[in-house]
Amino acid sequence: MKQLELEVNIRDGQVLLLYGMNHEGKTREQLQLKGALTHWEPASLTYHMALDQGQLLVDVTQAELSTHLQQVMLAGRAPLLRGEAIILSFQLLEKLADRALLGFPDSSALWNCDVKKSGGL
């Protein structure tokens, strides 16, 4: 079974975002974006970031990149090729013990995520 994965790490003003495809428990392809946290709104728990570095990580045994990740990569790489950052925001909508609901207003996407003990949200 294939599943989309999203990991957001924010530490000391630096952001690492990993977006990829998991197949049968193993990450097969992943976009890695790095940049800076540009603003944080404590009242709304909204995080704003500028991602100015990108890399595609692929399992070499994989025959081809999924259509979905190809589309995401092509859409996101245009600003990077122009030397511009990808501007992205998300809002922490709800947090329970080990779960968080994130909202991405630019795409109207909602993600129900695990919160790892090593830090994070």
Image: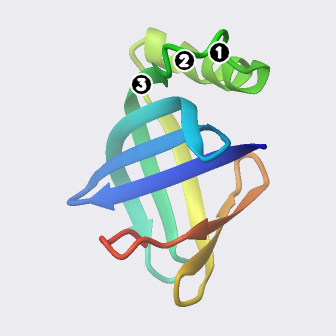
The answer to whether marks 3 and 2 mark residues whose Cβ atoms lie closer than 8 Å is yes
Nearer-N-terminus badge (1/3)? 3
Q: Amino acid at mark 1?
A: Leu
Image disc number at residue 74: 1
Which residue is found at the position 41% from the left and 22% from the top? 55
Q: Is residue 83 above or below residue 105?
A: above
Image disc number at residue 77: 2
Classed neighbour count for the residue bearing mark 1: other residues with Cα under 10 Å, few (<14), some (14–19), many (≥20): few
Classed neighbour count for the residue bearing mark 3: other residues with Cα under 10 Å, few (<14), some (14–19), many (≥20): many
Image disc number at residue 41: none
Which residue is found at the position 43% from the left and 29% from the top? 85
Quadrant of the drawing holding the N terminus: top right
Instruction: Name the secondary structure under disc 3.
Output: strand
Q: Which residue is mark 3?
A: 54
What's the CA distance linking mark 1 and mark 2?
5 Å
Q: Is residue 76 above or below residue 91?
A: above
Give the color scheme: rainbow, by chain, secondary structure or one colour.
rainbow
The answer to whether marks 1 and 2 mark residues whose Cβ atoms lie closer than 8 Å is yes
Which residue is found at the position 39% from the left and 59% from the top? 39
Name the one closer to the observer, 52 or 18. 18
Query: Horizontal and vertical percent for residue 26?
Result: 56, 40
